[in-house]
Image (cartoon, rainbow, N blue to C red):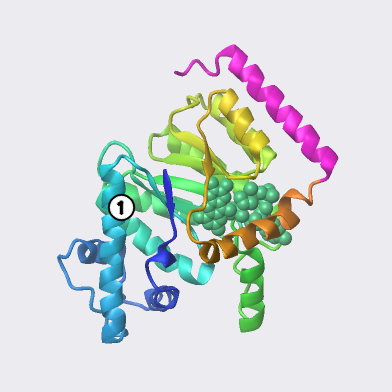
């Protein structure tokens, strides 16, 4: 599996411009238009972009498509990361186009990411899965809480616009749980693959319990993800109980991965460290107990 940040390949300002223009009535900025542009069937010439921006747009689309193609050829699943909300609409457009182009086989090769801390995350997940189904493509989704909390709050405050995120951590937890239920229901109907990407023991426990109740096999349709250096007790307990647990490792020069590392440091303050030490110890113990119990019973009978 490989994660990909679109803004490493396409200028973030261009993504923001595209997102703004997507809201306009009669826009041709649809996944179908991007699919045709990625395939070279049409030139992606947009009247509101300068010739240089149009050229960069076309090159970036081809670049994204060739990364997805190379990943698919190697049997590598490509997970497109979610980024800041003023870009995310454009990134979703590009991700759906990649899904449309590369997910026509038995398994989804390109996966989207849904951030539960965004208001309306459940609608986003439902919309993406419906679009993929209508287009005849397979859908895969990485479910996260969201990594840009402080930046998003500051931006909304500075611009005097409504905050796009849930107002409290508790509201984000509720949203994550609801998105998880929706995604698991899609997995049961064979309409999605899911990565439960979190270090939150309660969310992992919810996923494991619901998988058991819905009779979803441990290694089919659902996998788990934690960041390298975080939540190792969760990854190890999951692995020992026979679930697919992945560690996400950032790759790149120090200067490029520093903002990523800074966001991780923030998260430790926002989430993980806010839970009391006792609560964390009890949750970890309970998670281990339930997973090992399940492993001893042979899970839900799945291979
Ligand atoms: C494998 C993997 C891939 C990831 N990929 C992405 C990605 O593509 N895009 C992305 O944005 N993030 C990504 N993340 C990071 C993720 O969004 C979270 O920032 C991180 O996992 C911490 O959330 P948690 O569920 O693990 O933990 P928790 O500690 O339970 O939750 C912390 C999170 O809760 C939310 N939160 C905290 N305080 C508040 C508040 N006051 N109001 C509202 N919400 C609040 C924030 O999202 C914060 O990050 C990824 C994480 C993993 C494990």
Q: Residue under label 1, please give it.
A: 68
Which of the 4 image quadrants contains residue 237?
top right
- Asked if residue 173 can be seen in this view, the reply is no
Rendered residue at 23%/73% (across/down):
44
Q: Of residues 231 and 132, which is closer to you in this image?
A: 231
Residue 152 lies, in percent from the top left, at 61, 70
Quadrant position of the N terminus in the picture: top left
Magenta stretch contains residue 285 = yes
Q: Please identify the residue farthest to the top as the structure is shown.
A: 297
Left or right, 66 with respect to 264, comes to: left
Residue 176 lies, in percent from the top left, at 61, 48
Q: Please identify the residue farthest to the left as the structure is shown.
A: 41
Which of the 4 image quadrants contains residue 154?
bottom right
Left or right, 239 with respect to 219, comes to: right
Q: Please identify the residue farthest to the front as the structure is shown.
A: 253
Left or right, 117 with respect to 134, comes to: right
Magenta stretch contains residue 44 = no
- The boundaries of the magenta stretch are 276-303
Rendered residue at 79%/47% (across/down):
275
Left or right, 198 with respect to 139, comes to: right
Rendered residue at 25%/64% (across/down):
62
Marks counted in the figure total 1
Q: Kindly state the secondary structure of the residue where label 1 is placed.
A: helix
Residue 131 lies, in percent from the top left, at 35, 53
Q: Is residue 148 above or below residue 187?
A: below
Rendered residue at 25%/72% (across/down):
58
Residue 203 lies, in percent from the top left, at 64, 40
- Asked if residue 215 can be seen in this view, the reply is yes
Q: Residues within 10 Å of mark 1 (few under 14, many from 20)?
A: many
Q: What is the magenta segment's predominant secondary structure?
A: helix
């Amino acid at each position: 599996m490989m994660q990909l940040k679109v803004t490493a390949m396409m200028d973030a300002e261009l993504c923001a411009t595209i997102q703004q223009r997507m809201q306009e009535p009669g826009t041709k900025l649809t996944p179908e238009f991007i699919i045709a542009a990625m395939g070279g069937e049409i030139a992606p010439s947009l009247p509101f972009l300068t010739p240089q921006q149009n050229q960069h747009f076309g090159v970036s689309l081809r670049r994204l498509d060739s990364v997805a193609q190379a990943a698919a050829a190697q049997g590598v699943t490509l997970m497109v990361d979610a980024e800041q909300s003023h870009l995310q609409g454009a990134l979703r457009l590009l991700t759906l186009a990649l899904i449309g182009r590369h997910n026509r086989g038995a398994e989804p090769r390109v996966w989207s990411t849904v951030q539960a801390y965004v208001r309306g995350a459940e609608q986003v997940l439902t919309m993406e899965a419906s679009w993929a189904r209508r287009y005849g493509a397979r859908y895969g989704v990485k479910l996260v809480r969201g990594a840009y909390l402080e930046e998003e709050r500051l931006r909304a405050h500075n611009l005097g616009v409504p905050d796009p995120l849930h107002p409290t951590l508790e509201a984000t937890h509720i949203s994550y749980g609801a998105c998880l239920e929706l995604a698991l229901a899609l997995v049961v109907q064979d309409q999605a693959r899911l990565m439960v990407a979190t270090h939150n023991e309660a969310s992992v426990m919810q996923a494991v319990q619901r998988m058991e109740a819905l009779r979803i096999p441990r290694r089919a349709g659902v996998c788990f993800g934690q960041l390298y250096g975080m939540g190792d007790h969760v990854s190890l307990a999951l692995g020992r109980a026979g679930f697919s647990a992945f560690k996400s490792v950032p790759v790149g020069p120090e200067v490029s991965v520093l903002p990523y590392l800074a966001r991780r440091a923030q998260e430790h303050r926002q989430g993980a460290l806010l839970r009391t030490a006792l609560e964390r110890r009890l949750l970890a113990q309970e998670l281990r107990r339930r997973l090992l119990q399940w492993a001893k019973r042979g899970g839900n009978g799945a291979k």
